[in-house]
Image (tube, rainbow, N blue to C red):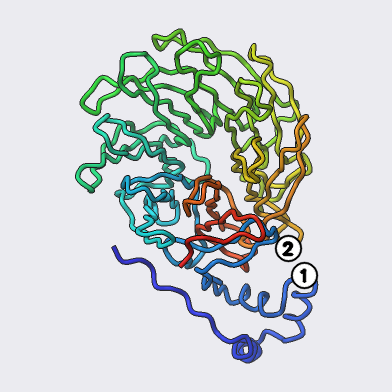
């Protein structure tokens, strides 16, 4: 499938002449550049909205451990990526990327066709505002299918537009099965055997607007499912099937934003019957919960919760808030969680834990979608080095591209180290540092970067 036409870069001098001719004074350009901290060239390209998408080879980031390059379709216009997933979709031993593209209303597959070589194609039918994917063998036939949560509208609406779609992989092709329709806007869906009958059921987070819900879909065979509602709160954004209480069955852990700002566990009795338990609730009803993931950050044998709060979709224009940041909810083993604020981070959104420095413990990477982008100090990607004893040291990775909302971790060059893939959601200014999908290769200073074209 052909992709968009790449944008062209024009000489800065020529653009200056054109801007002056059409009535933009040179002094105004220089003044805006000085106030924003950007160069005159960057300011001019923002004025004329010329995306800087010409770096597909590796370039250094602000931290010497990571080098960046753009992968996938060329960056044109203002990308609206909602989620990226690391998965070897074609089982060739090379890690690929699934892209939820709410601008194109499609799911993209950035396939690594050879080490360091990437090519993207859309593999789904039109899905309005896809929010998340999971690559998993739903039909248990030995290959990876693609599970998709569809919001139906990127911005809040009371209309029930949410969908769940499964792309069944069959002989290298993808067959779309619509599993759920006309639900409150669906932000997340993930698979797991929730009733212990040997097939994969679905856990669904319906964010909605004024009303939402959390429900699970019992797999009854033949691509049919039966719904079981667990709660009807609006704002559920993540739901994770996981054996949190370590009793041998899958529980559910979810975060509910909006005015609730709470994290819940739904403890499974093994047969699909769930007991609700509140794990954490913020005292600030404008906290901006933006995501959770599970990881044993203190290596004590139980699963902790990595929790970000940096959502700013409610504001016009979207702006960060002083209480945004990253926190660790430490599990004592009996599902009592202690709150640790790790770092203030304006606009904190996607996060993940992995051992980035190879010292045997879990570090954290996070991205920001809503930051003070007019300032060069505003970081879109950071990592937190685990120093032990609940202490983490912050390291800045990048302020370019901006507006990064999602991050996935995987070894993309086969060197045994976790790399990063991030996606950008550029629906508000500035537009001077645009990035659709970016690969960040993790290589310690002084070592080879491995397979890069």
Could you say where residue 125 lies in the image, as x and y percent from the top left? 29, 49
Assess disc 2: are there few (<14), some (14-19) or many (≥20) residues with their C-alpha within 10 Å of its C-alpha: some
- The answer to whether mark 1 and mark 2 are in CB contact below 8 A is yes
Vertical side of 142 occupied by 447: above or below: below
Assess disc 1: are there few (<14), some (14-19) or many (≥20) residues with their C-alpha within 10 Å of its C-alpha: some
- Viewed as shown, does residue 440 lie left or right of 140? right
Toward the viewer: 311 or 439?
439
Residue located beneath label 2 in the image: 374
Residue at image location 50% in from the left, 68% down from the top = 56
Toward the viewer: 39 or 234?
39
- Viewed as shown, does residue 179 lie left or right of 407? left
Could you say where residue 247 lies in the image, as x and y percent from the top left? 50, 10
Could you say where residue 428 lies in the image, as x and y percent from the top left? 60, 58
Residue located beneath label 1 in the image: 37
What is the quadrant of residue 191 in the picture?
top left
Residue at image location 62% in from the left, 57% down from the top = 66
Residue at image location 66% in from the left, 30% down from the top = 297
- Viewed as shown, does residue 131 lie left or right of 381? left
Disc 1 to disc 2, C-alpha distance: 7 Å
Vertical side of 453 occupied by 143: above or below: above
Vertical side of 243 occupied by 151: above or below: below
Determine whether the residue tagged by mark 1 lies in a helix, strand or loop.
loop
Q: Is residue 179 visible?
A: yes
Vertical side of 76 occupied by 436: above or below: above
- Viewed as shown, does residue 141 lie left or right of 122? left
User: Which quadrant of the figure contains the C terminus?
Assistant: bottom left
Q: Is residue 314 visible?
A: no
Determine whether the residue tagged by mark 2 lies in a helix, strand or loop.
loop
Could you say where residue 245 lies in the image, as x and y percent from the top left? 55, 13
């Amino acid at each position: 499938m052909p992709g968009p036409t790449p944008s062209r870069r024009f000489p800065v001098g020529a653009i200056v002449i054109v801007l002056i001719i059409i009535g933009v004074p040179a002094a105004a350009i220089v003044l805006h550049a000085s106030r924003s901290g950007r160069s005159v060239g960057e300011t001019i390209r923002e004025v004329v909205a010329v995306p800087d998408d010409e770096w597909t080879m590796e370039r250094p980031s602000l931290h010497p451990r990571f080098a960046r390059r753009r992968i996938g379709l060329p960056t044109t216009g203002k990308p609206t990526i909602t989620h990226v997933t690391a998965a070897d979709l074609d089982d060739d031993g090379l890690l690929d990327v699934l892209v939820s593209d709410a601008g194109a209303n499609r799911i993209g597959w950035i396939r690594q066709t050879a080490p360091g070589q990437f090519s993207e194609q859309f593999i789904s039918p039109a899905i309005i505002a896809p929010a998340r994917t999971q690559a998993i063998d739903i039909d248990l036939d030995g290959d990876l299918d693609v599970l998709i949560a569809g919001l139906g509208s990127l911005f809040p609406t009371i209309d029930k537009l949410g969908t769940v779609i499964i792309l069944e992989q069959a002989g290298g092709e993808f067959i779309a099965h619509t599993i759920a329709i006309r639900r409150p806007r669906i932000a997340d869906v993930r698979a797991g055997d929730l009733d212990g009958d040997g097939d994969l059921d679905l856990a669904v987070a319906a964010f909605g607007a004024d009303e939402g819900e959390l429900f699970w879909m019992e797999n009854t065979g033949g691509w049919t499912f039966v719904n079981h509602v667990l709660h009807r709160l609006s704002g559920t954004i993540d739901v994770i099937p996981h054996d949190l209480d370590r009793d041998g069955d899958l529980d559910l852990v979810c975060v509910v934003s909006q005015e609730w700002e709470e994290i819940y566990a739904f403890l499974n009795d093994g047969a699909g019957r769930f007991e609700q338990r509140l794990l954490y609730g913020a005292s600030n009803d404008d906290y901006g919960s933006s995501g959770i993931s599970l990881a044993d950050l203190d290596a004590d044998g139980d699963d902790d919760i990595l929790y970000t709060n940096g959502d700013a979709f409610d504001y016009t224009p979207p702006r960060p808030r002083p209480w945004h940041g990253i926190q660790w909810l430490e599990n004592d083993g009996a599902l009592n969680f202690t709150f640790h604020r790790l770092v203030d981070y304006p606009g904190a959104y996607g996060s993940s834990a992995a051992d980035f420095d190879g010292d045997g413990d879990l570090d954290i990477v996070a991205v920001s979608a809503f930051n003070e982008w007019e300032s060069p100090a505003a970081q879109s990607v950071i990592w937190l080095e685990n120093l032990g004893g609940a202490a983490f040291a912050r390291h800045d990775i990048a302020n370019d591209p901006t507006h990064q909302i999602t991050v996935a971790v995987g070894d993309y060059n086969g060197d045994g180290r976790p790399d990063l893939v991030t996606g950008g959601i550029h629906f508000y200014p500035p537009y001077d540092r645009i990035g659709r999908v970016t690969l960040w290769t993790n290589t310690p200073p002084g070592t080879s970067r491995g397979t890069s074209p």
